[in-house]
Image: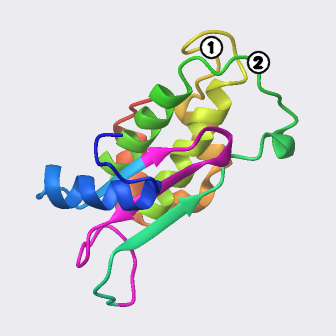
Amino acid sequence: GVTGEADICSALRVLLRDLAPRAQWVVSTLGSKGCVAVVRPGSDSIDSCGGTGWTELRHDAWPLGKTGRAVVDTTGAGDAFIGGLACAVRRGMKLERSLKLATYVAAMNCCGHGARGGLPSLEDARQEFPELLTSSSEANVLVAEPCM
């Protein structure tokens, strides 16, 4: 790869350190295995206990079995993931919660045909993630400014 690192987390750290010195975190999708993010030391993008080292956040792929749905077409899954992630970050959600929403959006998109066949609506996402609306500021933004 670009970094010369064999391990994905090592490669992500090199990307942050050498190619994106002002970025706080970087994420990679892992297909059916979910995603991983590497967060720069000292970032306020995550809820941490004040640690000073690099943080790796892993999130499993969304479990479609619990929804009674099945994968139909994986076209656009990565784009759907990035869209869900951008939507969550734009709304000020912490990275852990943003990754969860992104894996949900990607998985739901795979339940339809084509690049956007299964994208969930904002209402679908709000029904699936009531815990994502825990603060009044996030709830106001979600209602006032849909982006899915």
Residue 41 forms part of the magenta stretch: yes
Please, what is the three-letter code of the amino acid marked with disc 2?
Val
Q: Which mark is residue 8?
A: none
Q: Nearer the viewer, residue 146 or 55?
A: 55
**Residue indicated by mark 1:** 117
In the shown orientation, is residue 130 left or right of residue 10?
right
Residue placed farthest to the bottom in the image? 50
Q: Earlier in the sequence, mark 1 or mark 2?
A: 2
Instruction: Identify the secondary structure beneath mark 2.
Output: loop
| Residue nearest the viewer, comparing 95 with 42 | 42
Q: Quadrant of residue 55?
A: bottom left
Disc 1, SS: loop
Q: Which residues are magenta?
A: 28-49
Q: Are marks 1 and 2 in contact (CB under 8 Å)?
A: yes
Q: Which residue is mark 2?
A: 72
Q: Is residue 44 left or right of residue 74?
A: left
Q: Is residue 110 magenta?
A: no
Left or right? Give the position of 62 relative to 88: right
Quadrant in which the N terminus is drawn: top left
List the single residue furthest toward the top. Answer: 114
| Relative image position of residue 95 (x, y in whole percent) | 40, 60
